[in-house]
Image: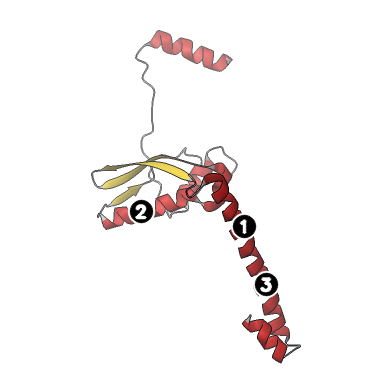
Amino acid sequence: EKTKAFLEQNPGNVKKEKRLKTDEEYYNSLLKKLSHIEELKQEYGKEIPLACCLFVKYGHQIVYLVGSSNYEHRVFRGPYAIQWKMIQEAIDEGYDLYNFYGISGYFHKDEEGYGVFDYKRGYNAVVREYIGNFILPCKPFVFKIYNKLKHIY
């Protein structure tokens, strides 16, 4: 409104005309977002489940075990809000380490599992490599059958 008033008194100001166009585009995008919010309220009510995570506070660290998010509403970045909250809690409670827990070990974009690494790396995380995992079959015969069936299916 201020820019429109200025242009009425000073027509032909190129800088202010560009500013008005930018302001109008921004205003229209906000109206569109508000409309979308109203649609979501109609569909879901006051709360929309965006994401969930499971954490364990253990010793000197908070461990992020697993998480999931609503793919349909990914634009709201639910997991990021949860991580931010828990990182703040870790700081407030004096934990030494915020452990994002395991990654696949795939560090190249074309490898499956890279997305998990990339997400955790976005928090300026440091990768600590440990010894890995192994399988100890308690019932070797059943385990052998399981592996053969797994490859068939």
Give 72 or 27, whichever is nearer the viewer: 27
**Which disc, if any, is residue 87?**
2
Q: Residues within 10 Å of mark 3 (few under 14, many from 20)?
A: few
Q: How far, Cα to Cα, is label 2 from label 1? A: 33 Å
Q: Is residue 137 left or right of residue 37?
A: left
Query: With respect to residue 146, does 94 lie above or below?
Result: below
Query: Where is residue 74 shown, x and y percent of the image?
Result: 55, 48
Query: With respect to residue 39, does 20 lie above or below?
Result: below
Residue 65 appears in the figure? yes
The amino acid on which the numbered mark 2 sits, given as a three-letter code, is Ile
Q: How far, Cα to Cα, is label 1 from label 3? A: 16 Å
Query: Where is residue 120 shown, x and y percent of the image?
Result: 45, 48
**Which disc, if any, is residue 128?**
none
Q: Which marked residue is nearer to the observer: mark 2 or mark 1?
A: 1
* Numbered circles on residues, count: 3
Residue at the location (70% across, 86% down)?
7
Q: How far, Cα to Cα, is label 3 from label 2? A: 38 Å
Residue extending furthest toward the bottom: 9
Residue at the location (36% across, 38% down)?
130
The amino acid on which the numbered mark 1 sits, given as a three-letter code, is Ser
Name which of mark 2 and mark 1 comes first in the sequence: 1
Q: Which residue is mark 3?
A: 24
Residue contact at pointers 1 and 3, CB within 8 angstroms? no
- Circle 3: element type: helix
Give 88 or 34, whichever is nearer the viewer: 34
Query: Where is residue 144 shown, x and y percent of the image?
Result: 45, 11
Residue extending furthest toward the top: 141
Q: Which residue is mark 1?
A: 35
